[in-house]
Amino acid sequence: MAENKKILLSGVKPTGRPHIGNYFGAMKQFVDLQNEYNCYFMLADYHALTTLQNATELKRNTLDLAIDYLTIGLDPANAVIFKQSDVSEHTELAWIFNCILKMPYLMRAHAFKDVVTKTAKVISSSMPLEYTVDTIIRDKGVDAFKDVTVGTFDYPLLMAADILLYNTDVVPVGQDQKQHIEYARDTAEKFNNIFGDTFKLPEEKIVSDLFTENGSMVGIDGRKMSKSYNNHIPLFSSDEEIKKLVMKIETDSSDGEPINVRAIHFPIRKALYPNELTGDYFKNLYSEKRGQYQALKEALITDLIAFITPLRKKREEIASKPDKVLEILKMGADKAKLQAEKKMSDIKDKVGVK
Ligand code: ADP
Ligand code: TRP
């Protein structure tokens, strides 16, 4: 690794096929930044385990995500591409962080709050929207946590370990991960205060100007695009899938303009053609084809197919050589392990277990 370059680390969970929101929000940045930084790209399989508890699926998804990483253009000759669970220092360091961070602090994490709020809604469907975790706990007692695994609660500290083990400077992620990077920074500061200067404070790198839905790309139902809402367009979809998904977008005809088609087409077009004046393209398209929902959807389908087809073909080629992919992961694990062991040795010394 080049001495003079800063360090970048990021990861994606192997929980299913990545979608265009993942790609334009996070993964494309990996590719764009890989020459500027010394890079670590991780397959966050232990994080995936918090929601995916099926060995066959997790194994398949992990290999698939490695293939996806290579397809979008991550270069194993320069970047370290590895699987989180291959480097046991991640979970080891997470334990140390468990011992110094406090419960109320972790209870402020969005992901934790989301599960608690959902549980409370199931317990009482009349729960007002403004319910906070505090009021839920007061009203429901420990039942408020009945659907929260300890892994979900602890998720931010394993992620802090991922980041801090490699002296990471920047972490490219989507807007919804911003809080996790703040957790990593706070955790580093907390550790440094107790045991002396050990960790660098990482910064997030977020592209949000492309998107509309709270800084994220919208899905076909107008909410944030997410695998968990099942409103996503997979990055390597077939033509048929693309057509079916786009045709599912509901059109709102109140003022003669299909708002939802425009709302999803706009960020996609802007992402696909960053140097083009997307506003002008849309003004023309949407005035020429005013009210012609089918034709407007077809324009979106054409844009998606033109972008996805070559990627899908490249993916098929890489997927046909799984042994090569496994070899790359082995090489990545060896390199990551070397750095993680070195860092862990210092950490163990600092906390007094060496
Ligand atoms: P999902 O919500 O679909 O399960 P992940 O949690 O696996 O997505 O996210 C992987 C990466 O993609 C993260 O960096 C996340 O911030 C980013 N990301 C996810 N959804 C979007 C979106 N709709 N727009 C932009 N970035 C996104
Ligand atoms: N939490 C991230 C997500 O849901 C995945 C992740 C795990 C990650 N460890 C990381 C991202 C370290 C960046 C850095 O997408």
Image (tube, helix red, strand yellow):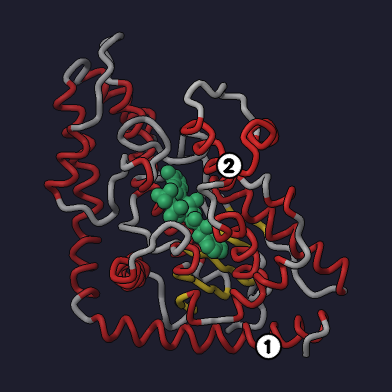
| Rendered view: 185 above or below 62 | above
Q: Residue furthest left?
A: 240
The N terminus: image quadrant: bottom right
Q: Quadrant of the C terminus?
A: bottom right
Q: Is mark 2 within 8 Å of ligand 1?
A: no
Going by the numbered disc 1, the residue's amino acid type is: Lys
> Is residue 298 toward the left or the right of residue 65 in the image?
left
Tell me: residue 212, above or below residue 230.
Answer: above
Q: Residues within 10 Å of mark 1 (few under 14, many from 20)?
A: few
Name the residue: 63% across, 49% down: 179
Q: Which mark is residue 143?
A: 2
Mark 2: few/some/many CA within 10 Å (<14, 14-19, 20+): some
Looking at this view, is 196 or 291 the one in front? 196
Mark 2 element type = helix
Which secondary structure lies at badge 1? helix
Q: Is residue 67 visible?
A: yes
Q: CA distance from mark 1 to mark 2?
A: 42 Å
Residue occupying image coordinates x 24% and y 67%: 315
Quadrant of res 2: bottom right
Query: What residue sits right under mark 1 in the picture?
Result: 342
